[in-house]
Image (cartoon, rainbow, N blue to C red):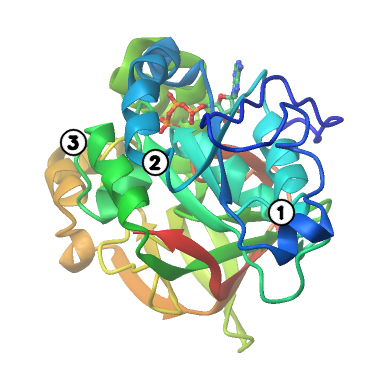
Amino acid sequence: MAAPSTPRPSLILPRASSHAHSQSSAVGPISDSAASRRRRGDFVFVVNPSGANGRTGKQWKQLLPHLRTRLADQCNICECITTGPSHAIDVTRKVIKDGADAVIAVGGDGTLHEVVNGFFCEGSPVHALDLGPDHSTTLGLIPLGTGSDFARTFGWASDPHDAIDRIVRGRKSKLDIGMMEGPNRDHFFVNVADIHLSAKAGYFASMYKRFGNLCYVFGALRGFWGHNNRDLRIKVNGGEWKTVHKVTALCIGNAKYFGGGMKITPTADPFSGSLEVVILQDFKWYDFLLKLHRLYGGTHLTVNGVSSIRAQTIEVMEVMANGDIFVQSDGEHFGFLPTKFSLLPGAVNFFC
Ligand SMILES: Nc1ncnc2c1ncn2[C@@H]1O[C@H](COP(=O)(O)OP(=O)(O)OP(=O)(O)O)[C@@H](O)[C@H]1O
């Protein structure tokens, strides 16, 4: 993923007729006097117009009048239309520092992933600069992407009006966030991080997003090309290093689904304080054909060659270091092994 670029507030629109923010003040610092009065919350919607092949941008435009009707008397509605990869990270960091009360990702898992990464900077949570230690920014989601796998864990229907209902209701829970430390950088994930075949397939799937959910099939076919199951070393919860033989894929779930609806870590729960690690060993291409329905249904934990453990931390490295084992998080390419994964329990408030 490209390095974060300079903040580009491409479009931030405070909306409701009654509030006094100007266009620039909606992303600028909130003044002391404003903070000391009873504040109207600033809710920033970070919209990826290119999500789901451009469908996200179109749906968002249709949704906005409804959103205003439902929310405008409750908070200031601000929108940011992202201009490219990593913009959502930058803008989220900026609006949190400026005192946003909620940042809502509008798009797919990639957009949610970037917004979640914007809640952190250099490994630490980002805070509002002028609102004191008690202020926190709530994360929200209007799932409008190709796969929108994170939303599946909660059984959320794809109707964005339901997502708006959740935001209006304002119920919040403390969401666990995964952290990954690689040789060159730290990063955060909210859904599933994975290693080897699935990560390689995800890397290629991202090139075929124009084909909708079929991108995962094309990605898998390319991922299989030249694939070898590999011996890996893992260290769970700071224990001893162990060798796991012929690993096909190792998946670390904060939530349950990836790859457009595959229930890969079926017992993961992003409010549980632990990760579910599922390891597939010695799978051949035909095993996927024979067992695909088990993977999609989440009934694969009893299949030969599949194991599941719960962990707070897991470190993974190659036995023979070639630097060619793919790692991805939330469907976004992260890099290559070695990587350490850990959990930050209840790190972010979340509308649910
Ligand atoms: N204006 C833009 N133009 C091109 N790409 C963008 C733009 N804004 C954001 N992006 C990138 O698009 C990527 C994918 O977007 P997103 O996840 O919202 O949709 P999706 O891939 O269709 O859905 P899913 O990830 O759920 O399958 C994001 O990771 C982000 O980096």
Which is nearer the N-term, disc 1 or disc 2?
2
Dots 1, 2 in contact, CB < 8 A: no
- Quarter occupied by residue 2: top right
- Asked if residue 221 can be seen in this view, the reply is no
Residue 312 placed where, x, y %? 53, 79
Q: Earlier in the sequence, mark 3 or mark 1?
A: 1
Residue 71 vs residue 62, the one in the foreground = 71
Q: Nearer the viewer, residue 8 or 78?
A: 78
Judging by the rendered image, the residue that carries numbered circle 3 is: 289
- Mark 2 crowd level (few <14, some 14–19, many ≥20, 10 Å Cα): some
Q: Nearer the viewer, residue 291 or 21?
A: 21
What is the quadrant of residue 56 in the picture? top left
Mark found first going from the N terminus, 3 or 2: 2
Residue underneath mark 1: 99
Image position of 205 with respect to 327: above or below = above
Q: State the image coordinates of residue 105 (x, y, percent, origin top left).
A: 50, 39
Q: Amino acid at mark 2?
A: Leu
- Say above or below: 202 vs 304: above
- The secondary element bearing badge 1 is classed as loop
